[in-house]
Image (tube, grey):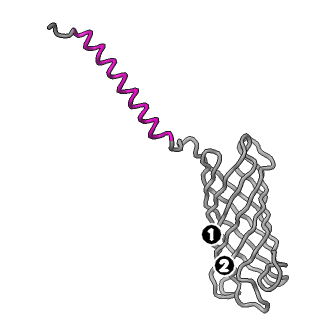
Amino acid sequence: MKPPSTLSLLIALSILNVGIVNGQKSLVNQTTKNQIPLRAIKYINITNISYGIGIGGGIRGSSGHSSFGVHTINGCLISSKLSIGIGVGLDRLRISENLGQTILPVSLDIKYFFLRDPRILFLGIEGGYSFNLNGNELGPKSGGLFIDPAFGIKVVSFKKISFSINLGIKIQENTIQYVWMPLPKNETLLNFKVGIIF
């Protein structure tokens, strides 16, 4: 039997090489199709001004209380649908005309954006710990936990910036202990936020 010529050997190797490369590409596609590509993850900043109105009557309610604050969240937006970020802010909680407290909230914020082009509706939850900046003036407690589930809309959107409005219910563990009036264990506030997303 005649040995194969150099030309037929080269043709056979070329066909084999193309098959191996195509097989590798399909294997890569199968292993990475469920992963999020890096280009789909973008930086996001959410900065809000908030105003809370106390709700609930009686000794356990927050009626007549209010809060005002500024929060900023830095994080990442994944595939234009889900954002995860770390937030920090400054809140002033007003219990009565002569009684208030300043707190520093540090939080984890998660938002999910609905609807396509543009994604105008979103649901979110922010939660964390608020540090008492009044020291021992109103009791020795250093701070308390809080949670703030909310929904919102983007009212105006430009190329890289959107203006948003949020409405949520914020539950803040009370850090004031020694006062002349009974206070609820948790402050419950109807929380309005307006701000920018970029």
* Magenta stretch: includes residue 190: no
Q: Is residue 195 rendered to the left or right of residue 74?
A: right
Q: Is residue 196 rendered to the left or right of residue 20?
A: right
Give neighbour class at mark 2: few <14, some 14-19, many 20+ (Cα, 10 Å). many
Compared to 185, does 33 lie above or below? above
Q: From this viewpoint, which residue is outermost toward the left?
A: 1
- Residue under circle 1? 128
For the point 74% across and 42% down, which residue is it? 118
Q: Is residue 45 rendered to the left or right of residue 120?
A: left
* Magenta stretch: includes residue 16: yes
Check disc 2 and report its element: helix, strand or loop.
strand
Compared to 156, does 134 lie above or below? below
Residue type pointed to by label 1? Gly
Residue 99 falls in which quadrant of the image? bottom right
For the point 77% across and 80% down, which residue is it? 100
Give neighbour class at mark 1: few <14, some 14-19, many 20+ (Cα, 10 Å). some
Q: Is residue 101 rendered to the left or right of residue 80?
A: right
- Residue under circle 2? 132
Q: Is residue 149 visible?
A: yes
Marks 2 and 1, how far apart at CA? 13 Å
Residue type pointed to by label 2? Asn
- The range drawn in magenta is 5-33
